[in-house]
Image (cartoon, helix red, strand yellow):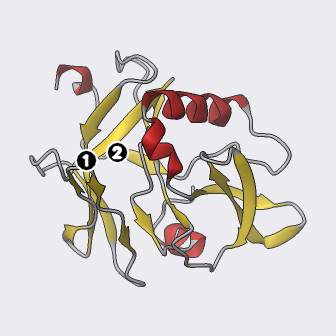
Amino acid sequence: MSDQKNLKNEPAIGLPAGCTAAKSDDRWADCAAVLRSASPARANHGHSWCLETDPDTPAARMAFSLHQDSWDCFYAALRSKQVGFRPVLTLPEDHGMEDGQIFHRYALTMDGKLAYTRMGNRHGVRSYRPGAELRFVDHVNDERAQIPWVVYGNHAIAAENLLVNISWNDLSAQGFAR
């Protein structure tokens, strides 16, 4: 836990930024490269919502596939097993962790119940229940329920999608699209 001493109880968690259909900016490209090298098996979990819109289709949002190393756009209201929620955590500048380091912290709850768990080799990626409240909490001691984060710069990205069947609109309504 010493590597995590500077993390706050109220995490700054949201969707990754810097995604465009033409080219990602260096932050996202660096993040994707670190994630693929630190946890290659987890890079295969479909597309992940990002903040940006598709410039040609304002009702669509961008999603990135680490496995295919490609950008695609989907309508913001789409709920699908192919597109999920892989959040980014903003770290303090003095966090003291190396790029590619994996640490476990915070649990995701849906209406107060654990929404994500890891059980052996089976990852517990669950479907979002429309209208359910999502919260990241720091009081769950079971490491299987804590999210694995991969450090890159002053950020960490969830090692895999935490939820599927969640739309960009759902995430925005919860405050994660900021």
What SS does tag 2 mark? loop
Decide if residue 145 is on the left or right side of residue 53: left
Dot placed on the residue nearer the N-terminal end, 1 or 2: 2
Q: CB of mark 1 within 8 Å of CB of mark 2?
A: yes
Relative image position of residue 105 (x, y in whole percent): 25, 41
Q: Type of residue at label 2?
A: Pro
Q: Quadrant of the C terminus?
A: bottom right
Q: Which residue is mark 2?
A: 11
Q: Quadrant of the N terminus?
A: top left
Q: Which residue is mark 1?
A: 106
Relative image position of residue 71 (x, y in whole percent): 74, 52
Relative image position of residue 11 (x, y in whole percent): 34, 45
Residue at 26% x, 50% y is 121
Q: CA distance from mark 1 to mark 2?
A: 9 Å
Residue at 75% x, 70% y is 60
Of residues 175 and 89, the one nearer the viewer is 89
Q: Which is more foreground, mark 1 or mark 2?
A: 1
Q: Type of residue at label 1?
A: Tyr
Residue at 25% x, 47% y is 106
Label 2: few (<14), some or many (≥20) within 10 Å?
Answer: some
Outermost residue, right direction?
Answer: 56
What SS does tag 1 mark? loop
